[in-house]
Amino acid sequence: MSGLRPRFEDLFVGYVIPGRTTHILRNQIKTYADASGDQNPLHQDDDFARAVGFPGVIAHGMLTMGELAHCLTDWLGDPAALVRLKVQFRAPVFVDDVIVAEGRVKSLDLKARTAVLDVWVSLKRDGNTEYPIRKGEAVASFAER
Amino acid sequence: MNATLEGKVYPDATFTVEPERVNLFRAAIGEELAIVPPTFATAAEFTVMPFIVGDAELGLDFTRVVHAEQEYEWYRRVRMGEALTVRSRIASIRQKARNGFLTIETEVLDRDGRLVVLARATMIERGT
């Protein structure tokens, strides 16, 4: 958190939002399950996860989305400035993965003072880049509130 | 999955934004600021979600379900301590190739009935 809110006037198409890197831990996934209420065993029980085709428990997609939203609200300096977020979950996140949430400005509406952002979450696995979230889109409002 | 259930509305649930729960959620996503994170709306959604995925009439096979898409529209900031109403419905059920697509739309309303958050969750039931 820089403490400096971006000014709408300083944005441009292609403007890069500071990324957020998170090392996903097993107890973090458990905490997320209790906090969100999503107690699907896929996120807590290795045997269940293996039975449905994963090598072990996977993080909730919504936890990954939460980290992405955190990246955006840190940049915006105001959680209420985030008015829309839509994501597709495209790859699993395993315990000990290091995920990176990022984004850039896709378009600006000068009249409404809103910015549409391309957002995504990536990780490196076996030398490849995978995208737990890709083609995400967010809308941030810089209108006076 | 029973496609005739498109449009089904589930009973309203009440969700109170409890500080302890918010703090647990902040810990899970590493939020150091004393705010209600926007995606805390997920906790409200999950007051009704288990009744949908566990709805015998819908007949979802949980072992074949993956969360494919999620969308939130926020109309105002969620306030600590406030009581919210959570209203979910099955917005659509589609079959594409061997996979079933279920979209659940959830309105989170304040005590005046005003929309605070709109959530759309799309699940895929993978074909066997």
Image (cartoon, rainbow, N blue to C red):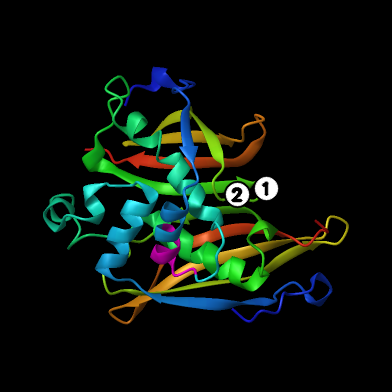
Read off the magenta span.
B25-31
Mark 2 in CB contact with mark 1 (< 8 angstroms)? no
* Residue A37 coordinates in the image, percent (x, y): 35, 46
> Looking at the picture, how far across and down is residue A8, in whole percent?
80, 70
Q: For the stretch drawn in magenta, what is the main secondary structure?
A: helix
Q: Is residue B29 magenta?
A: yes
Between residues A126 and A119, which one lies in front from this camera angle? A119
Tell me, for residue B76, which label it has, or none. Answer: 1
Secondary structure at numbered mark 1: loop
Pointers 2 and 1 within a single chain: yes
Give the label on residue A39, or none. Answer: none
- Which image quarter holds the C terminus of chain A? bottom right
Q: Secondary structure at mark 2?
A: loop
Q: Would you place residue A125 above or below residue B41 in this image?
A: below
Residue at left offset 41%, top offset 20%: B5
Q: Does A137 appear in magenta?
A: no
**Going 65% across and 29% down the picture, which residue do you hit?**
B113
Q: Nearer the viewer, residue B110 or B97?
A: B110
Q: Residues within 10 Å of mark 2 (few under 14, many from 20)?
A: some
Q: Which residue is mark 2?
A: B79
